[in-house]
Image (cartoon, grey):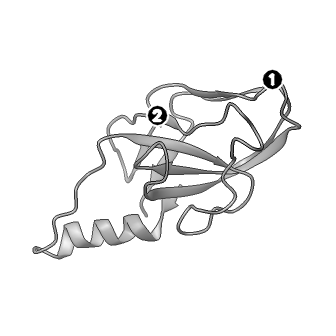
Amino acid sequence: MSLSNYAENLLLNWLLNPSATPIRPTDLYVSLHTGDPTEDGATAEVTAIIDANYVRKFVTFGDASNGSIVTDAVVSWLVDENSSGYSVSHIGLWDSATAGNCLFIGEMVVPKALTASAILTFNAGDLVAALD
């Protein structure tokens, strides 16, 4: 995953602007996207219209090492039994379960086609955020 424009500005202000006082998000949430979410993360997020069960999922990370950090727990979604299905190609990392600010965006190596009642699971370590 790469930083969103919002997160890039937060990081730059924290590192280089002594008068800025960015606040670290207290909780983090993963979003699913059916297309490129763009730099603000606001495009192509799965909605309740596509999947009545869809919500952003709370996620936690371990300690950073060598410029990257990985999730430290499983995160899963159960597709609604009445969904006509969809394909997840991107994910986002947000500071809020609804609305909020996108912090990271990333394209899945292999998009995942989901059908009614399917389960999408990311195991601990599957989601990686990195700076390079």
The 10 Å Cα crowd at callout 1, few under 14, some 14 to 19, many 20 or more, is some
83 left or right, relative to 62? right
Query: x, y percentage for residue 24?
Result: 26, 51
Residue type at numbered disc 1 = Ser
115 left or right, relative to 107? right
The 10 Å Cα crowd at callout 2, few under 14, some 14 to 19, many 20 or more, is some
Of 112 and 80, which appears nearest the observer? 80
Image position of 12 with respect to 73: above or below:
below
* Disc 2 element: strand
Residue bearing mark 1: 117
Tags 2 and 1 touching, CB below 8 Å:
no
Image position of 119 with respect to 20: above or below:
above
Q: Which residue is the extreme one toward the right?
A: 84
- How many numbered marks have been drawn onto this rendered protein structure? 2
* Disc 1 element: loop
- Which residue is pictured at 75% across the width and 44% down the height? 49
7 left or right, relative to 83? left
- Which residue is pictured at 43% across the width and 58% down the height? 101
Mark found first going from the N terminus, 2 or 1: 2
Query: x, y percentage for residue 118?
Result: 79, 26
Of 69 and 31, which appears nearest the observer? 31
- Which residue is pictured at 43% across the width and 54% down the height? 100
Residue type at numbered disc 2 = Phe
Query: x, y percentage for residue 56?
Result: 55, 39
Of 68 and 105, which appears nearest the observer? 105
* Quarter occupied by the C terminus: bottom left
Query: x, y percentage for residue 25?
Result: 30, 48
Q: Mark number for residue 30?
A: none
Q: Mark number for residue 58?
A: 2
- Which residue is pictured at 82% across the width and 43% down the height? 86
Q: Which residue is the extreme one toward the left?
A: 18
- Report how far apart the C-alphas of labels 2 and 1 lie in the structure: 21 Å
